[in-house]
Amino acid sequence: MSLITPERELAIVSITEIESLQEKILSELASICSAQSGALWVSGERVGMRLRAWRGMIDKAALPDLVDPSLVQTHAWKSGTSLLVPLIAPNSELVGLVQLSDPISGGFVDELLDACERFGPFAATAIKTATRFAQLQRQGLRDRDTGAYTLSYFTDYATKEIYKARRYGRAFSLLTFSLDQLNQIRQRMGHSAVRQAQQIVLRVISQIIRDSDVVARATEQEFHVLLPETDYFGGLMFLRRALSSVLEEPDARAMEARVSMGLTGGVATFPRDGDDFDELLICCRRRMDERRGSLHHHLKLEPLPFWDEVELLLGNSKSPRLPEAPGEPSRRGKVADVLFEELQAEIGREFLRDPTARGLLYVGGPIIRSELPIVRALDHAPTEFAPRVYLLGRHADLQEHHAMTPVFLEGDERLARHEFLLWMGDGSAYGLLQRRGRGATWGFHTSDPTLVEGLVSKLQTAYDLQPY
């Protein structure tokens, strides 16, 4: 059994690169305890302690990605065949947790508990110091005009994030924002207004990001945001929040009254959209182009409230044709009476094929009843069901459901006359709006992601629903 020495402690506290430090701490504790396997969780923002490193014969799939700090004891302890070591700083702050297993001798002796507790504060202090060092290092790499990080720092950070994502089997998201109307702003309002537009966007984004997220200025009109450990759906939710937050900012609204900033954005996620930074960036820009070509953009739907947009999109048999878009993702006209029910059943089946995949579904109509196909489809949904499902309408015989949230809206005549289904998932989107009439059902349906996002956002605003 290795002993704790001043040289070992010094080797830990002298490492300032956080990723190397985490690997070293796990390696040293495994050596001290003669353990062949181990895992390390480190405290993060608002989400408890996240898995940061592992080694040996341990089954990564069996390790929880997050550990609740309230479950961690203040002293090292044995649990079954594992030894658990809390990393607690001298100020009593819980910084991390190490799990050691597969001891060479066949078991962990009690004397190791005291040794691990002596080592824990050094490891905790080293993690806090390395984290602070990284923050200070980042502060010196900002663009002077906007306060964003430089592109060189951003690409270096992204390269490290790709390495971590590959090493630990995680996802991260890259977002790109563009001020498309920057030349018009310069021509009409001057160069100072260009800088103001840039600063507005960066100020708002900086207010909603986490400490681990990084924002960089790429060109005069383009900015990048990297969101570590964020899947595509999470990146999409951040994009929606960022775009709406900028539009709500008072200085942005004042500028928009004179000339549009033309802010658009796109999101790509590692590894599903690309295996390196360039591939992800190309994907972001392609999705920005898709947003620019959306019906939402061509019909200038952003200022309209939800029900006004519904009526405009539905139109009637005498309404002008909708602008054509690549792939014709949007159509309106007569639809089958059973389409609304069949779509609910199919989406429910899709949910159950992968109940851990995140998504957002709104189903609205005159009455919320237990016979709705989506309700019947999800009656046997598992407890780890990840999609968020909301039913909107008058109350009938469904009071509550473990896999969805009823939103009872009594006396809303617009819901009495319409039905809708809005779905946003991991890489897919679909919307159906319909109005039943005598002998025919008139509908509008679309797979335009930007249009569906806009409808969802306005629905949430109209009925005070949780936005993200």
Image (spheres, rainbow, N blue to C red):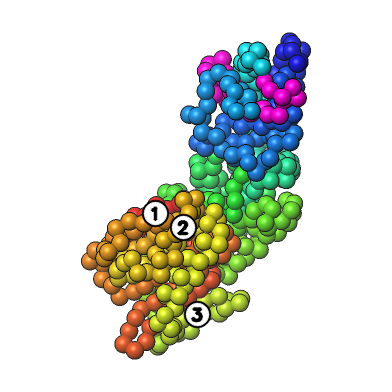
* Left or right of residue 135: residue 336: left
Q: Is residue 139 above or below residue 124?
A: below
- Residue 21 in sight here: no
Q: Is 107 inside the magenta-drawn segment? A: yes
Residue 132 coordinates in the image, percent (x, y):
62, 26
Secondary structure under tag 1 reads loop
Marked residue nearer the N-terminal end (3 or 1): 3
User: Does 222 sit above or below residue 291?
Assistant: above
Residue under numbered circle 3 = 331
Identified by mark 2, the residue type is Ala
* Residue 269 painted magenta: no
Image quadrant assignment for residue 23: top right
Mark 1 belongs to which amino acid? His
Q: Which residues are magenta?
A: 86-108
- Residue 164 horizontal/vertical position (percent): 71, 41
Contact (CB < 8 A) between labels 2 and 1?
A: yes
Which residue, given by chain and number where applicable, does mark 2 sit on? 381
| Residue 205 visible, this angle | yes
The quarter of the picture where residue 115 lies is top right
**Separation (CA) of disc 2 from disc 3:** 32 Å
Q: Nearer the viewer, mark 2 or mark 3?
A: 2
Badge nearest the viewer, 3 or 1: 1
Q: Residue at x 32, y 84 (%)?
A: 437
Q: Are marks 2 and 3 in contact (CB under 8 Å)?
A: no
Residue bearing mark 1: 402
Q: Residues within 10 Å of mark 2 (few under 14, many from 20)?
A: some
Q: In the rendering, at what x and y percent does residue 47 appear? A: 52, 37
SS type, badge 2: loop
* Amino acid at the residue labelled 3: Arg
Compared to residue 70, the image places residue 434 above or below, namely: below
Badges 3 and 1: C-beta atoms under 8 Å apart?
no
